[in-house]
Amino acid sequence: MSFATRFASLGGTRGLATALAVLVSAPVLAQTAPTQTAPAQRPAAPAAQPARPAATPAAPAAQPARPAAPAQAQGAQAQQNAGPTVVQVKAEPSQPEWTKVCGTDQNTKTEICYTTRDFVSDQGQPVLALAVYDVKGQQPQKVVRFVMPLGLLLQPGLRFTVDQGQAVAGRYVMCLPNGCFAEAAVKDDFIASLKKGANLNVSVQNQMGREITFAVPAAGFGKSFDGPPIDPKVLEEQQKKLQEELQKKSEEMRQRMLQGQGQATPPAPGAAAPAAQAAPKP
């Protein structure tokens, strides 16, 4: 099963959009909070000073004009000093290990393997998927491919690095309703570092231009990359089980929505009559 098809069965548009809304809105609120509260706090000092002697009336009058400039300076300084928001993701619970899948390109007769895993937020919502392709043959290639959440800026692309190593630039290829695909060619030294590394840090920009870094755990990657591929029958069974779990969750969500709609149903017209009759007519 292809990487694209496999990921499409793991979450859908709603899960990705919800996860992104939480991750993107949090840093924006954190940025705007200081500029909203600082002006409200500073003018309080002049208001508390009328008890001073009349010989110093100019001091309170001169101070209300000060908060605007410091507040703007503080807001700009906070944006400059704020580093990327780091989001630690975790492996999809249904994937205890990285999965290696191999097949043969029917056109070129070239063997292609990819080692893949899907990652979710702390709430279990799909965030991103990752696959490292190993193309055999006369011109061997190694390619890292991602499925990233919707709502990110596409033009800057993305950057990824193993721990604190050298960053690799990736570009977006296409977007589908359940996410945007990005990729980059890598060399053997990158694969070697990923096998030993703790995290693959994937940096992107949200709609506000704020950098977000997804810290993707790399534990177990090397074992799966160098190990044998998964048996196609086992993979099919895993996909079947996962599909059943997704259908179960979908049904549970539908039931909760129906229950919520039942609770929000307005009272019958007869129930409102006593309240209306309680008020005396003019």
Image (spheres, rainbow, N blue to C red):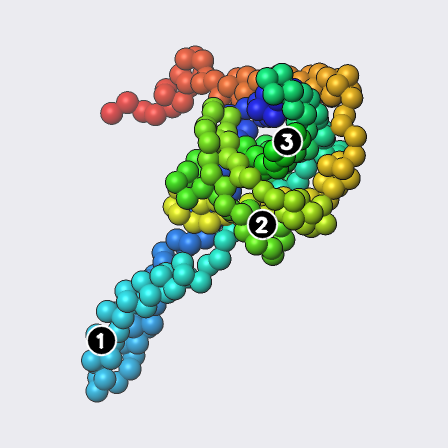
Q: Position of residue 219 (x, y in %)?
A: 73, 44
Q: Nearer the viewer, mark 1 or mark 3?
A: 3
Q: Secondary structure at mark 3?
A: loop
What's the CA distance linking mark 1 and mark 2? 52 Å
Mark 3, residue position: 138
Indicate the amino acid at tag 3.
Answer: Gln
In the image, what residue occupies the spot 59% across and 37% down?
A: 144
Q: Residues within 10 Å of mark 1 (few under 14, many from 20)?
A: few
Give the vertical position of 70 relative to 91 (above or below): below
Task: Tell me: 135 left or right of 47.
Answer: right
Q: Residues within 10 Å of mark 2 (few under 14, many from 20)?
A: many
In the image, what residue occupies the spot 50% across and 53% down?
A: 84
Indicate the amino acid at tag 2.
Answer: Thr
Quarter occupied by the C terminus: top left
Q: Nearer the viewer, mark 3 or mark 2?
A: 3
Q: Position of residue 62 (x, y in %)?
A: 22, 75
Task: Tell me: 257 left or right of 64.
Answer: right
What's the CA distance linking mark 3 and mark 2? 28 Å
Q: Residues within 10 Å of mark 3 (few under 14, many from 20)?
A: few
Indicate the amino acid at tag 1.
Answer: Ala
In the image, what residue occupies the spot 20% across and 80% down?
A: 58
Residue 125 visible within the image: no
Q: Secondary structure at mark 2?
A: strand
Mark 1, residue position: 62
Q: Position of residue 275 (x, y in %)?
A: 40, 22
Mark 2, residue position: 161
Q: Secondary structure at mark 1?
A: helix
